[in-house]
């Protein structure tokens, strides 16, 4: 009872769904890259708060990472999405903007970034602790401001230590974008489901989408490994 | 021995103030938000919790048993098996769980329905439901991630220990059972508890294929009561408690296992 697989369904133009799939893929990559960048920024701030912050700041960062790591991503995304859009639209109304609409892509990026930030905080905190303290002290002794120390010394020196963890986080980010399909974002997984249920060619579309995700994973693996060796240059090999 | 310092750490003034603020926030949430749906929803929430926990326990146990051959094949299997298990782990770990779940549920579900042999077999009453597909996806995903962990653990056992076991005349099976497996498991334990927490956090995905777990129950409540925040906040609180209980329980288990050092 197998019909032969109809590959023309993957055509790039209108009757085929290939173009829609690639658009969804592009959107997934945008969401993942944006969320990853936001996550790194939150991670650096969170790690600084945990390592150098005052008592209150330290505890707040601790609570943030604890909640992010204990609650399912799907639930967090729903919560951030509803709370975030609600707060922003209320703030916009209070400031007198009416009919204010939040860009879906931006909302998705922020939601992913907030989740990524919790994990990135832990990775970066560990990496900063692996930097010999003398290097940071030397930078401070030259009279660099805390921001300059961070930018010129701490971040470059901790990057090789953070790379394995951060590479892992990028993989998680690409896969977490699929969860946005549940909220209704038209990224790859959502588009795939639409295409599959419209044509009833479930295996064709789900397997093509899987191939796209796999391609992204394998390609980024190559790039990340190259960057890790680059970041490690000048370091003595571990073994 | 740790308790007095823990108590003293919790009694630091800024923590007391933060705890008071959190308590005030909690009181405000209970007082100002709408919670009258809660008593009627409790039985359904309890059922959902049972589904979530059953899925977690079942997929972790089955997935772990699948992970062992996956890891062993990669460490010492003949090359076709090695490549197969490596490919399996790469594909499962490289694609989103949600996509796999939908592939199994929509794809396999539609495929099975085409065969009269399957429709008339004893398995059909199960295959018609959603949970076997959810269980399959969760199990395969856990097996792939845990297989990777176990692979590292198996290769990490010092070679001399295995040679010593062989030197006293143990059969390959006995070496595995008495030395290789226990040592590898012990190395993998800390990561195993992390993986179990991750698996708990993956379970709500099965709600998207109509399995009524904790998350699905909450979604239903949100739709019927038209409340945005209250059920979500409750859900976050429940998952926080579940994770906390799991973390404490797994750490207790880990500490009970003697290290021999």
Image (tube, coloured by chain):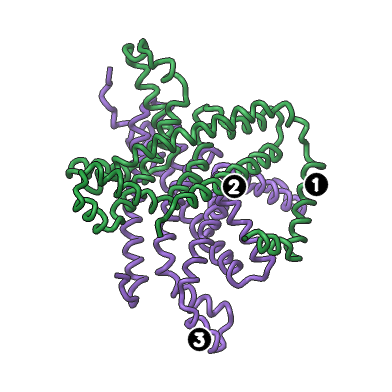
Q: Residue at x 58, y 64 (%)?
A: A46
C-alpha span from label 2 to label 1: 24 Å
Shade representing chain A: purple
Mark 2 residue element:
helix
Between B169 and B221, the residue placed more toward the observer is: B169
Report whether A238 appears left or right of A188.
left
Picture quadrant where residue B108 is located: top left
Which one of the lettered chains is coloured green?
Answer: B
Give how far apart the Cα atoms at labels 3 and 1 are. Answer: 49 Å
Q: How far from the left and from the top, in percent, is residue B223?
A: 66, 30
Give the mark toward the camera: 2 or 1: 2
Q: Residue furthest front?
A: B168
Can residue A19 be seen at all in this image of the molecule?
no
Q: Are marks 3 and 2 on the same chain?
A: no
Q: What is the secondary structure assignment of the residue under circle 3?
A: helix
Q: Which residue is mark 1?
A: B28
Identify the element where label 1 is drawn: helix
Callout 3–callout 2 Cβ contact below 8 Å: no
Q: Position of residue A21 (x, y in %)?
A: 40, 40
Residue wearing tag 3: A138
Instruction: Give left or right: position of B255 versus B22.
Output: left
Q: Which mark is residue A188?
A: none
Residue that carries the numbered disc 2 in the rendered image:
B244
Q: Along the polypeptide, which appears first: circle 2 or circle 1? A: 1
Res B121 → quadrant: top left
């Amino acid at each position: 009872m197998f019909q032969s697989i109809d590959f023309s369904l993957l055509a790039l133009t209108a009757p085929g769904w290939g173009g829609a799939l690639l658009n969804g893929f592009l959107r997934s990559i945008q969401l993942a890259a944006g969320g990853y960048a936001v996550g790194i920024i939150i991670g650096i701030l969170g790690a600084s708060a945990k390592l150098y912050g005052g008592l209150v700041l330290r505890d707040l960062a601790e609570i943030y990472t604890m909640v992010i790591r204990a609650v399912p991503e799907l639930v967090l995304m729903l919560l951030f999405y509803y709370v975030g859009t609600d707060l922003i639209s209320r703030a916009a109304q209070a400031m007198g903007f009416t009919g204010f609409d939040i860009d879906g892509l931006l909302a998705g990026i922020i939601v992913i970034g907030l989740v990524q930030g919790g994990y990135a905080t832990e990775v970066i905190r560990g990496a900063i602790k692996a930097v010999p303290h003398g290097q940071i002290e030397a930078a401070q002794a030259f009279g660099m401001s805390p921001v300059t120390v961070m930018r010129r010394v701490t971040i470059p020196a901790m990057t090789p230590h953070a790379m394995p963890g951060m590479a892992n986080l990028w993989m998680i980010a690409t896969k977490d974008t699929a969860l946005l399909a549940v909220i209704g974002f038209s990224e790859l997984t959502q588009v795939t489901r639409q295409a599959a249920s419209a044509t009833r060619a479930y295996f064709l579309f789900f397997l093509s989408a899987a191939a796209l995700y796999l391609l992204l994973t394998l390609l980024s693996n190559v790039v990340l490994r190259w960057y890790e060796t680059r970041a490690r240059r000048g370091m003595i090999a571990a073994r | 021995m740790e308790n007095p310092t823990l108590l003293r750490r919790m009694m630091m003034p800024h923590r007391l103030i933060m705890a008071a603020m959190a308590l005030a926030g909690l009181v405000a949430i209970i007082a100002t938000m709408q919670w009258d749906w809660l008593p009627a929803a409790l039985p359904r929430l309890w059922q959902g919790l049972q589904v979530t926990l059953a899925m977690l326990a079942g997929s972790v146990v089955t997935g772990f048993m699948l992970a062992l051959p996956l890891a062993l094949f990669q460490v010492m299997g003949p090359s076709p098996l090695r490549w197969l298990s490596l490919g399996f782990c790469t594909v499962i770990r490289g694609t989103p769980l949600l996509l796999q779940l939908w592939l199994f549920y929509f794809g396999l579900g539609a495929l099975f329905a085409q065969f009269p042999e399957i429709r008339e077999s004893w398995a059909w009453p199960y295959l018609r439901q959603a949970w076997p597909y959810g269980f399959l996806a969760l199990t395969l995903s856990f097996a792939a991630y845990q297989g990777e962990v176990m692979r590292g653990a198996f290769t990490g056992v010092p070679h001399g220990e295995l040679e010593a076991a062989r030197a006293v005349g143990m059969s390959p099976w006995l070496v595995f059972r008495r030395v290789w497996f226990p040592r590898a498991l012990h190395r993998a334990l800390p990561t195993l508890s992390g993986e179990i927490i991750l698996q708990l956090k993956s379970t709500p995905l099965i709600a998207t294929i109509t399995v009524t777990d904790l998350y699905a129950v909450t979604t239903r409540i949100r739709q019927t009561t038209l409340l945005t925040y209250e059920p979500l906040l409750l859900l976050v609180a429940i998952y926080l408690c579940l994770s906390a209980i799991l973390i404490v329980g797994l750490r207790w288990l880990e500490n009970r296992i003697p290290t021999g050092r």
